[in-house]
Image (cartoon, rainbow, N blue to C red):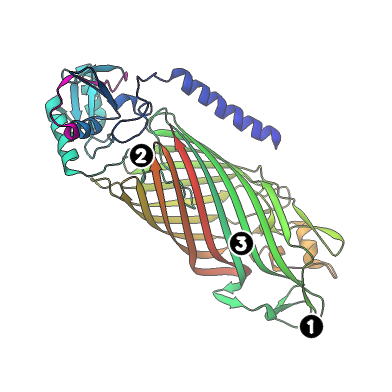
Amino acid sequence: MKRTIAGIMLILGLIAGNAFATALNVEPPESCESCGMNRQTYARSRVVVTHEDGTSSGFCSIHCAATDINRKGAKPIRDLQVADYVSSRLIDARTATWVMGGSQRGVMTSRAKWAFANAPEAEEFIRINGGAYATFDQALQDATAEAVKGGHVTHDHGPLAFNPSFGDDIYHTHPAGMWMLNYRYMRMSMNGLRDGTTDIPRSAVGYKRNLAYNYMMIPTSMTMDMHMIMAMYGVTDRFTLMGMINIVDNEMQMLMDMGPGKMVKSDAPMKSSGLGDTELRGVYKVSESLNGSLGLSIPTGNSTQSYTSMGATYRAPYDMQLGSGTVDLKPALTLSVLSDDGQWNPGGQIMYTHHIGRNDNGYTLGDSIKLNSWLQRAFGPAAGWLRLAYNYSGSIKGRDPEIQRTLDGMMTPSMPDADPNNYGGHRVDGFIGTSVTWHGISLGVEAGIPLYQDLNGLQLKNDWYLTAGAQFMY
């Protein structure tokens, strides 16, 4: 496990070193003087305005430059430079060849505006991405019209595009050379028992008392905490690499049936914690609104966790294990649309998880399908959203013999979680969240509850969800 983590960190380190070695050193200021976003990230759209009094200002885009010019009024301008789209070096904005529109999303604008030092390179850009030639005056006039209108149009990494706290991973691409680091804390709380769509009272579960469910140990509640650390890097404008590790912490409260009238609380909650499975993923932009991705889950999470009960040690049930124990394939399709004014973001995603073969303990988790839909609204640097998620997963296939012996033995601590048939089902969850972005740093929180649960066999039912996240882009 330590070698796996070291290997992942080495790969990420090599990528980071190469990115920094080849990065363009952008002139001051570091942040756009209009919107505060990092100008290094948007080196190929940046603008420098020099006034007659010798003062200069730096911006991430012609949109932000037009906003500042409109705000400062008639202050005379001596020179206006813009980055060449191809080389990112500064050129005279007035003599550059400009292209407006096309499929390559612009910066802080609903209509892309790119400058080229060489006309043939502009022609090749139009051939690949579409758009039309424009003069500098036309590009500035269009940007000024947007500035006067006052609509806030987000960057590619604004408050709508890359959300810091969705409880599910929503996959997207980044511009070439951009890094994103994300940390999320997620808690899922489960409380009470359910079979299918029916809530099951504790009194219906007991050991050898002719009850509907014959188990000695009765789960009453459970919390699952996850700490997720993710890094993404834009290899090209269309292809992004992602790596993610998880730290998992599970705790289950139980009752023990010691005979009629002797239902007692377990001497200690069942716990498991440690590194979960590691995910590597490639994301490819198919079109401006659609991307496809393929994830590979590596079984770095331990699947032989144990617990002690009545002075003996047993293999913990399946839902207390930290990983699947199998290599998993996770393809996904994501549709994310940004309105022309940058204020609205509807979207949806479908992801399938396939567990390859059986793990070393003789079982495989059920394959799953996850459907996500959301609607976000920008409020300046902040955003709010509603999200609806559908989850289906199958029952566990096969059995872990060490877990199975808790069901088959005499006076062993049998519990519903030890039965592989008591896993999976259908669930619909609803969420509400908010986030704020400032100078490339985003903070957010999301809360949710299950709206519908149809479970395979006797299981703890989900009660509520909470996710808090922070991310940094550069």
> Regarding mark 3 in the picture, which secondary structure is present there?
loop
According to the picture, the residue beneath numbered tag 2 turns out to be 286
The answer, for residue 120, to whether it is visible in the render is: yes
Nearer-N-terminus badge (3/1): 1
* Residue at x 53% of width, y 40% of height: 230
Q: In front: mark 1 or mark 2?
A: 1
Residues in magenta?
A: 70-88
User: How many marks can you see?
Assistant: 3
Q: Which of 443 and 94 is in front in this view?
A: 443
* Residue at x 74% of width, y 56% of height: 400
Left or right: residue 18 versus residue 46 is right
Residue 474 location (% of width, % of height): 43, 31
* Label ID, residue 395: 3
Q: How crowded is mark 2: few (under 14 residues within 10 Å), some or many (20 or more)?
A: some
Q: Distance between the residues labelled 1 and 2?
A: 63 Å
Q: Residues within 10 Å of mark 1 (few under 14, many from 20)?
A: few
Kind of residue at disc 3: Ser
Residue 379 location (% of width, % of height): 31, 50
* Label ID, residue 261: 1
Q: In front: mark 3 or mark 1?
A: 1
* Residue sticking out furthest to the right: 311
